[in-house]
Amino acid sequence: MKKNILVIPGDGIGPEVTTWGKASLEKIAEIFGHEFVFDEALMGHAAIEVTGEPLPDETLEKARKSDAILFGAIGHAKYDNDPSLKVRPEQGLLKIRKELGLFANLRPILLFDELLQASSIKPEILRGTDILFFRELTGDVYFGEKNRSEDRNTASDLMIYHRYEVERIAHKAYQAAQQRSKRLCSVDKANVLESSRLWRETVQEIAKQYPDVETEHMFIDNAAMQLIKNPKKFDVVLTANLFGDILTDEASQIAGSMGMLASASVGESTGFFEPIHGSAHDIAGKDLANPLASILSAALMLEIGFGLKDEAKLLVDTIDEVLKDGFRTHDIADQNTNRFKVLGTAEMGKLVLK
Amino acid sequence: MKKNILVIPGDGIGPEVTTWGKASLEKIAEIFGHEFVFDEALMGHAAIEVTGEPLPDETLEKARKSDAILFGAIGHAKYDNDPSLKVRPEQGLLKIRKELGLFANLRPILLFDELLQASSIKPEILRGTDILFFRELTGDVYFGEKNRSEDRNTASDLMIYHRYEVERIAHKAYQAAQQRSKRLCSVDKANVLESSRLWRETVQEIAKQYPDVETEHMFIDNAAMQLIKNPKKFDVVLTANLFGDILTDEASQIAGSMGMLASASVGESTGFFEPIHGSAHDIAGKDLANPLASILSAALMLEIGFGLKDEAKLLVDTIDEVLKDGFRTHDIADQNTNRFKVLGTAEMGKLVLK
Ligand SMILES: CC(C)[C@H](C(=O)O)[C@@H](O)C(=O)O
Ligand SMILES: CC(C)[C@H](C(=O)O)[C@@H](O)C(=O)O
């Protein structure tokens, strides 16, 4: 199989983790005899520094031409500390999602047995958890009109949904639920928000086309609680952009660490694969980041992007083995014991490749 | 001390738990020689059934005349299942918050040692946690303009903040932080939302007036994760209406159960005291609800509303004792052992009074 893959390292720990996602794809190509052709492009703060723009035209063009994109992370402390800056790294990520029509963000909460202890949640609560989030990615308050009054004293963002936006992601989520344990939980705040009422109405309609799937509707506040109280009760979770952002970060604690979770954004054409973790400026360049989420992003690219199940499985199984052998990065090591061999980013990356 | 207290039982388990909140206030009056004069009023589904309105004028009038309000819960399955209904119970709660100017919702995460085991989070992660949330309560996407297109295919809610709204709650939160461990974490989504950028800017300004308090700014997705990863790192948390709704429900798992948390809404005049839990239709009328959150709401009324510290402490200490003696309601009992004496709502209420 021949594929063109665009690598966008981005900001913070993005470059150091993406190195290993890319290397694992190269290794897979070698083992299975595929031809993966790589190109690289700028986005975020890294792109602003060079071109003045968070998403240069060149990056977007390359993205459109590629079969899949491996992305690192975005964001920089400078902008976080100064809310008045007009050009911001995150605009690049939001724009590429919109331009490529990546309306469905799939975030599987993958639980490695070896990491049950790494979570702040009790292992007996976690064991057996298997959740697949469908987060809507190109609508909601992320993309609605923003306003700031002239006197700068009033600011607003429009939380808005169109029925077709809810329908298309609902179909994807229901189809996935049919392949899994046939339960779907849709999360909204329909007791307060009109956009959530449209969301709920639409999901209720779509649900009728999937009578084999059991649907539950839950308010976001309750979901944020249930997710850690009893994560096993969830299978497919379908939700809006903002609520999905919050719930999936929270759910990363189920998997032991944000450093273990990857996501796939799909929609109209090219798929976009990235870790859930952010740019983590505080540890950037210190060889402390966990490269496994980027390698798992590569695995999602193989499976969801290219339909290469065996190739993806080899990566996941290798990570499983490395963990079983007691190797950990800092984020998933238990500080209180000497049970683990704690590795830096590069050592962990190399070990998985080997 | 003489005080007029309005009791609004509301919907679902509201009436059965509020009975015990009220009874505990009566008991306190008796012990300490205060005169609490009670009145009662309708709100939510209970009010719609009788008057057609979720917040009848009579209730609002009584509320304005009272010194404090003890509220139960709101909501009903009928409306949750039918997003198209125009008159909805929650409108009553939102309207009374707005009309009474209750802009600051204080949600202390109170940890009873005895309940460390009741949480899904590991006890060693929880021990020592002490968080006080300040949730803004009369602005945000809750109160911004709502729209539905004529063809019903587009729906929106305006997420909007004015600088003064952020300032007044920020002052309250900073003042509380000064009385506590002098750390404040402000939560927003300033990397995406303009309203959050106004929020962050404003908090940065107010922070300068409280140089003794250490301020941290955190994105909501990260906060949802950190809150369960390392709850001890938080002291005062300041956040917007929607984010506060989500985070505090999530934080209820820190306290073992939603059934243990109370909140105080304050602002321009009359204080409003209520459990964090909702109407829980599924267990309503079954004597399964936990009355402790309502009794703790009464304690908050005594402390924050009337400045009666000793009276409040007596209620909290009594609950502590009852828990130490091994008594539990269903939500906080460990299903796997026979260690606890599991009580119904009424039995638990009576026990605390005794
Ligand atoms: C960086 C930020 C804009 C982004 C988001 O909120 O979508 C991130 O948190 C994510 O979840 O991908
Ligand atoms: C019932 C609902 C409107 C309410 C809210 O979202 O504010 C509740 O969840 C709360 O937290 O008090």
Image: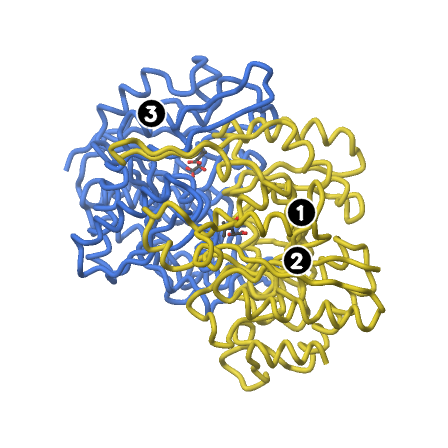
Chain colours: A yellow, B blue
User: Which residue occupies the foreground of this view, B12 or A142?
Assistant: A142
Q: Is residue A51 above or below residue B11?
A: below
Secondary structure state at the residue bearing disc 3: strand
Does any portion of residue B351 appear in the rendered image? yes
**A353 left or right of B300?**
right
Measured in 3D between alpha carbons, the distance from the residue under mark 1 to the one under mark 3, in whole angstroms, is 64 Å
- Label 2 and label 3 in one chain: no
Q: Is residue B19 left or right of residue A21?
A: left
Residue type at mark 3?
Glu
Which residue has dot 3 on it?
B40
Q: Are marks 1 and 3 on the same chain?
A: no
Q: Earlier in the sequence, mark 2 or mark 1?
A: 2
Decide: is A207 above or below A10: above
Quarter holding the N terminus of chain B? top left
**Residue under pointer 2:** A6
Q: Is A300 on the left-hand or right-hand side of B32?
A: right
The chain ID associated with circle 2 is A
Find numbered disc 2 in the image and state the secondary structure of the residue it sits on.
strand
